Image (tube, rainbow, N blue to C red):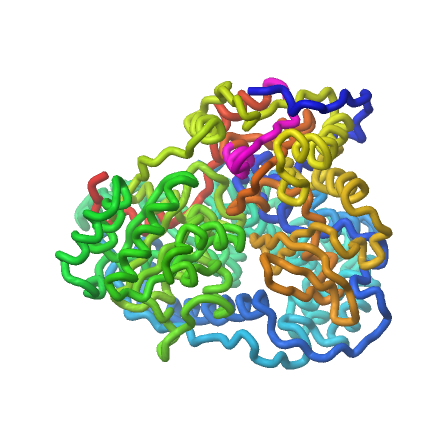
Amino acid sequence: MSTEPEGTEEAPEQEADGAGGGEAGTAESAGGGAGDSVSEEPGTDAGEGGDAAGTDAEGAEKARLSEAEAELAAQRIERERIARRKAEKQGPVASGAKLSGKAADLLAAVRAVESGEKPVAAVFSEPEAPRRPAQEPVRPRPVPVEAPGVGGSVGVPAPEAVETVRLVLAEGGAPENLAAQVAAALGEGADDRLRADPWQLLRVTGVRPEQADGFARALLGAQCAPDDERRGRAVTVWLLEQAALAGHTVLEMPALVAALVQRGVPDADAAVQSTIAEAEALVFQDALDPAAPEPAEDDEEGAERPVRILVGLERYALAEESLADGLARLINSVPKEDGSAEDWERAAASAEGSAAELIRAAAAGGLVLHTGGEASLTEPAALLVAARGLGLRSWAATHSPLGRDRFGALLATDDSARQVTTVAGLLSGAEGPGRDADGAFDLDLLVVLDAPQLDVETAALLVESLPDGARLVLGGDPAVLWSAGPGRVFADLLGARICPQVASRKPDPGPLGELVSGIGIGELNQVEAPGKEVVIVPVRDAGEAVHRTVQLVADSVPRAIGVPAEETQVITPGHGGAAGTRVLNAALKERLNPGPGRFGGFDPGDRVVHSPAPGRTLPGQVVKADADGLHLMCSGEPVVVPKERVEQSVRHGWALTAHQAVGGRWPAAVVVLPGDAAQALSRPWVYTAFGRAERHLSVVHGAEQALPRAVAEIPAKPRTTRLPVLLGAQTPMPG
């Protein structure tokens, strides 16, 4: 590897702005977390005021539903459908059974979590039947993308409701700025609910138990006590929400009880039971060995099959149940017969290597898994071309618009190039084939790329929306970071071995491919890079790391490598810290697009990322701002972000975290590894960050031995999910 591109000048020594390691912004660094859902959720570095429109004009026309709103509406309808079906089931679940400070400090804590400055609390330590018949699904109804909104944006509480909540917050000494969030979280009668149970304040993102306790003391006075049943329930739900943000869909009972004790709940067991009794959580008994036979009725007491007790929030538990049902339906159904066996074999014979295996597997089964790196994308592309040639209505879906455009380029010589969508666009109806009269996707074959990014709710929505007889291929690189949302769907499916799996034998080429492949197996190798494909830039502190990064993006990489600044992506472990995205974006903006930031911190030409929903990142550029909001151009599509949403959903985008960058690739990437980010590093993080570069990778390296140690010794932290148990009884398939 080279040390840095030619012509790079020495930087003067600078002092770091502060350690910031604890704010590295990834829950990978938090005990028990494997995803950085909260800390990766874009906030903004906007200046005070946050007025993206730069105007006091009010009463803008009611906007039609955006893609994000349509997606959220579709998810809400699907969750209601799942809940109805759950209520209609007779008896217990097949694999489990239900058992009978101050205002300023509080506001600062909420804002810190919402903006990503503070990561999810490290609450948890690392966690330690016959085939289910497929049920006839009740199809979700199509959701029109451009249906006119009623009363403003979806989920926005009425002004009167916000005002009544504001009065309660003021009475309890909490920041009145939280009124809209509280009203939205608690729904109708939010003020009465908050007064009756002040700990409901914990439902607002960023509020912690000690802050809710202070609010409750102010409202309840002498009636406030640590053993209050309301407090126990609220803290239990809060802990389950924190677990979900860290990637878990459920928690083992001992882990939940221990966390409640840590949070000062005197009778943790009673708190859990009260939460379950009030239907605020579900509890399951899952066999530790699902294949073990049930004990006979005449067995003496104590011979029960060993089980583990799991507790989870209803939305995630039901999503896993729905996902398992949908996958069983796909596996057990006969794929639609389009083309004879001879036609499929002829298509496979014309392909090469594992592409032929993939075509044969898709011909025979309703569910297929495909694994491989960037080079392996040619194999699902070959499958799509073959399937369209046989008359199948075939579509591909990717995690991000960048991935969509990249995969579409592989199909540029075929009409299939127009059959590529994003997962979010497919679900919302903004992209893709649309839905049939029954609410199912109007297709025969769906290839979902970037499958490791599927959380349980998104996966359930996709699977339940497939028509009977459709084929589903889930593909991706299992070594990248998992989904920002709860679950590890792709990894659980690979481990369950319930369907054919095709592993690509096509390695990623060149020095970058060699480097990333080694990281995937725990080896950080030095590679020969005659064309300066890989460059290491050693730095002594965070200040020097920021200086070198700006220098690389603005000068060295364009001059020595030929990649302009707008095609170079900076990746760093977190939003906070002395070399996090905030500091780097401020420095890069000053060099590449200086301006006053008069539109809520943004200027035309600024490089940004827009997050219309948690876990989704759309790279773009600021075009202008007006009374409607901030106008962006994202992957060739115009996007208008209402000014009240800019602070929560738009960030500068010259520097991203690895979770924000996953699913995209750029001609050049500059990965910044300051010393204060050592605890945030893991093998999946390094693999993902280094793998975003197509032609050139510069590593601004100040982490010393933490980098090779992370690659060799720190795999992905486990997530507690139920999907393996729900799928474990499926018939094992050969490797």
* Residue at 77% across, 49% down: 45
- Rendered residue at 72%/43% (across/down): 117
Viewer-proximal residue among 384 and 245? 384
Residue 555 visible? The answer is yes
The spot of residue 388 in percent (x, y) is: 29, 62
Residue at the spot 60% in from the left edge and 81% down from the top edge: 148
Q: Quadrant of residue 657?
A: top right
Q: Relative to residue 735, is residue 404 drawn left or right?
A: right
Whether residue 98 is visible here, answered yes or no, is no
Above or below residue 329? Residue 595 is: above
Residue ID at (64%, 81%):
150
User: Percent from the top left, x then y, of residue 589?
Assistant: 77, 44
Query: Which quadrant, please, contains the N terminus?
Result: top right
Find out whether residue 692 is within the magenta segment: yes
Q: Which residues are magenta?
A: 687-705
Q: In the image, residue 8 lies at what x, y percent?
A: 72, 24
